[in-house]
Image: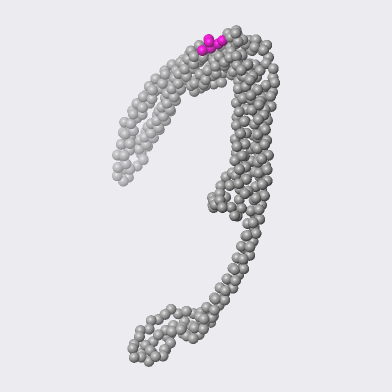
Amino acid sequence: MTSEVLVSRPRFDGRDVGQAEPAAALVAPQPSSGAATAGYRSAKYTPAEWHSNNFSILQHAVSDRDEARRIRAQSKTLYQEAEAATQWAQAEGTRLLGERLQDIHLWKSELQRHIEQLVAETDLLLAQKTRLEKALDATEIPYAIATDNLTCRERRPGPDLVKDAVEEELLKEVDLIRSVQALLKKTTAQVVSQIKINREAKLMLELDWSDKSQAYNFDDRCGRYNNMSPDTQYHPSSASMQDQVCNHTSWVKFTQENLSKALQELQATKDLRWERLVERVLQETSQDLQAQCSRVDRAFSQRCAELIAAKAHLEQHLTQILEQIGVQEKNTVALQQAIHNKEAPLRVVQSRLNLRSLRPKMELCRDEPQLSLEGEAGQIGATIASLCQQLSEARGSLSRLEESRMALEKDIMCKTHSLLIDREKCMAYRQRYPTISAMLGY
């Protein structure tokens, strides 16, 4: 009889916890037939474990079979509902695309009508622009002078960049020149500006019309798609892109705002074109410009006088500050010397106190010399602290004086630069102001 080695297997217990046998009974090896007679033993399952394992397998099979039936029923219901929902959603999308095409066609017609009106009105306005240019030429030089003065005065440094009387008069002069241009049949500048605005409004309408034409073609193509269309493709990212675009309300509002802007510009163009040119205002406006020019010149002269006076006052204070800086520097040196002079007495008294602290036994007493020395040490320490505090204040005062000196010097430079701008640049340029006959167009 051939001997065989029996290897133990893991034990499977299919019974409930309450029905499980004691661990000792399960662990104990069971006698086996055949090999046991030859002196071998093997841990095998008991019949009860075998029946329990079979019962557990059957229970799992029944549970899996029931679960499969339930999933199959749910799947059938789900794909039937999904098919119906998909068909309804596709039909609804096709219907909404048809309505969208009607809306786009309506707005395209409105945009086209407004574009044609803008083109017609702009052409009429261009015909009047030529008649206004000669009368407006005389106002260009005063306007250039006034704006150049304002630009030059913007380069005034730091604290001198103020809105003074000169700037106010220059701004009034600019406003007056613009008013003069407005009185010349709303002026060439107004006509050019209106033409520019009309073209911008027309461009916005044309861009909107072009976008709607392209959108109309896309939506018309979308409406023709169906499940049998051969040119449809997968575009997984197309749904996420829709979150970044506008909604229907903003879409309608955008076109309405464009049409409203076009209507406003049409009305403004008609008002400007129908306004009669008042030739007699040329005389009045030329006189107003000359009077304003005189007021600006007087303001410049007064401002230059103020700058000269302020510069002289700053220079006077700078001289005083420089004197105080010299005095304070001497005071700082004196305080430092006084502190240095207290170092030797402080060393003497501290040395005495240190040496007397070595006295033996009962000799180490607080006698009159000891009290005097302690008082002397305290007095010298307080004196040094007071001198140091005074030195710190003197140095702070000196630092502030230096800051004042730098501020005064900087302000003097600002005044000098501002005086150069107002007197040498602006007032010299204003001598080229045109005469009354030139502003009358002669």
Residue 67 drawn above or below residue 109: below
Q: Position of residue 192 (x, y in %)?
A: 60, 22
* Residue occupying image coordinates x 56% and y 47%: 241
Magenta portion: prevailing SS class: helix
Please tell me how many numbered marks the rendered image carries: 0
Q: Position of residue 376 (x, y in %)?
A: 37, 33
Nearer-the-camera pick, 192 or 4 = 192
Nearer-the-camera pick, 348 or 6 = 6
* Residue occupying image coordinates x 35% and y 84%: 5
User: Dividing the picture into quarters, in which one does residue 253 lie?
Assistant: top right
49 with respect to 371 (left or right): right
Nearer-the-camera pick, 210 or 347 = 210
Q: Is residue 368 visible?
A: no
Residue 270 drawn above or below residue 385: above
* Residue occupying image coordinates x 45% and y 18%: 413
Region of the chain picked out in magenta, as a range? 429-434
